[in-house]
Image: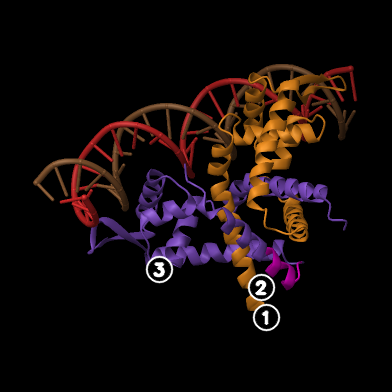
Chain colours: A purple, B orange, C brown, D red
Amino acid sequence: MADTPRDREESLDVIQRELTAFARRARSTAARLHPDLPLVSYTLLAHIDRRHGCRAADLAAHYMLDKSTVSRQVATLEKLGLVERHPDPSDQRTQVLHPTAAGTEALASTQASRRAAYRERLGTWTSEDLEQFAQYLLRYNSTGEGSSPR
Amino acid sequence: MADTPRDREESLDVIQRELTAFARRARSTAARLHPDLPLVSYTLLAHIDRRHGCRAADLAAHYMLDKSTVSRQVATLEKLGLVERHPDPSDQRTQVLHPTAAGTEALASTQASRRAAYRERLGTWTSEDLEQFAQYLLRYNSTGEGSSPR
DNA sequence: TAAGCTCGTTGTAGCATACAACTACATTTC
DNA sequence: GAAATGTAGTTGTATGCTACAACGAGCTTA
């Protein structure tokens, strides 16, 4: 554990490589896991649910997506009957998004199977390691929060 | 540090959410970082380089990609003059892929700017945290290695 | 009130991906 | 050693996710 600058570079490379590898695989894994509910839609739906309703612009900002992308995704979710749009009385431009009952349900079941997959995958990890890993990820993701979307 | 089952669930949820969030953002970040070299191409090129030559099938297996996807990506890399294909004398079906000089160079410069971005992003982390985080990611990614590609 | 901003939609285009069908080569089996 | 089966890679086709640009409608401010 000499802690040389070279170790740092090494760790940075590993982190970069492994995060990228994860991203590369995430899609196929997700697609295999829930062929029904598209990955992005799921993510957005989960976010809407967690926030107990939110606007499309919030989603775009949070995921660094173009508003047109979000617009289409939300349209898909609505078409699937998983999300409802409600007008915001205080601002006629915006729509407040809420999961429907079906949306909440779909989310719960997807969440469950997803959680099961993670549980299996991370079953051999100690709780401390899980906690620590989760903290690192949170810290990592919060760091670049302010980077401009375009 | 009570280590209840609920803590575990909580950590699992966070890991799931944060890894997904990362994946959601990876593309836009990468696109912003190197508009020239497409994300996937970069990843594959880096892999080819690391392995000092490999076959298309290896790439497909490692990244859980369909062989058709890899075929097209490699074709792109070849068109850009970053990769060369050499016949394998011991098996006429396969091609061994190698980075060209230009490929190595492109990789180095991309790697550099990328590393700089990571360095800035993770600048406040201690070496121990970096090392630990890298280990967790390695461990995470190696766990699901055997999952079937389709 | 006019200018400018924000929220969302739609048109268009590009990239990454999968699946299926196919060719060519290799391995196994009888 | 010929036939059946398997593997490497390509190409056709379709889909999903994304961005950018142009726009309409509603808010805000000067």
| Res. B8 mark | 2
Q: Secondary structure at mark 3?
A: loop
Q: Position of residue A46 (x, y in %)?
A: 47, 61
Cβ atoms at labels 2 and 1 below 8 Å apart: yes
Tell me if B99 is positioned left or right of B37 in this view. Answer: right
Q: Position of residue A67 (x, y in %)?
A: 38, 46
Tell me if A7 is positioned left or right of A55 in this view. Answer: right
Please give the range of residues in magenta.
Answer: A125-133
Rendering quarter of residue B54? top right
From what the image shows, is residue B94 above or below residue A92? above
Give the Cα distance between marks 1 and 3: 27 Å
- Assess disc 1: are there few (<14), some (14-19) or many (≥20) residues with their C-alpha within 10 Å of its C-alpha: few
Helix, strand or loop: magenta stretch: helix
Q: Which residue is mark 1?
A: B4
Rendering quarter of residue C23? top right
Is A139 a magenta residue? no
Callouts 1 and 3 in the same chain? no
Q: Which residue is mark 3?
A: A52
- Assess disc 3: are there few (<14), some (14-19) or many (≥20) residues with their C-alpha within 10 Å of its C-alpha: few
- Say what amino acid the circle numbered 3 marks: His
**Residue at the image position 82 percent from the left and 47 percent from the top:** A6
